[in-house]
Image (cartoon, rainbow, N blue to C red):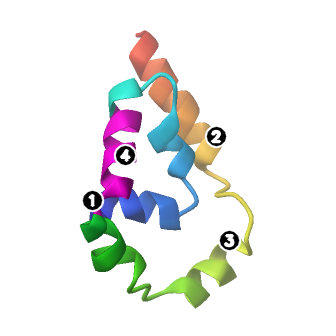
Amino acid sequence: MCCFNRLVEMKMESLLEMPELPNVAKYWQNLKSRKSYQQGLLDYPDHEEMLKKIFNSGPNPHLEIIQNKIIEQLNS
């Protein structure tokens, strides 16, 4: 759960929702609906300011490269 949340914090949530990875997307939806996800992670942000400085509310510059690598691996 915390690894998936870290992807969200790093502006890479779309990796968890890729149509090429339907089981990951379904699992992610289930995780987000858990009360423990809210209580254990979302209610205790610990580095929001640092992430704002890094990404300035924009996308992660590496996201597209990673998505393409995933698709490439799935197609090989």
Q: Foreground residue, 54 or 33?
A: 33
Decide: few, some or many residues near mark 1? Use Cα within 10 Å; few <14, some 14-19, many ≥20. few
Q: Which residues are magenta?
A: 24-34
Helix or strand or loop: what does disc 4 sit on? Answer: helix
> How far apart are the alpha carbons under marks 3 and 4?
23 Å
Question: Mark 4–mark 2 contact, CB under 8 Å?
Answer: no
Q: Amino acid at mark 2?
A: Glu
Query: Which residue is label 1 attached to?
Result: 1
Q: Amino acid at mark 4?
A: Trp
Question: Mark 1–mark 3 contact, CB under 8 Å?
Answer: no
Query: Which residue is label 3 attached to?
Result: 55
Q: Is 15 left, or right, of 22 in this rendering?
A: right
Q: Residue 11: where, in percent of width, then height?
A: 58, 60
Question: Mark 1–mark 2 contact, CB under 8 Å?
Answer: no
Q: Foreground residue, 70 or 28?
A: 28
> How far apart are the alpha carbons under marks 4 and 2?
20 Å
Q: Foreground residue, 31 or 76?
A: 31
Nearer the N terminus, badge 1 or badge 2? 1
| Up/down of 4 relative to 58, above or below | above
Nearer the N terminus, badge 4 or badge 2? 4
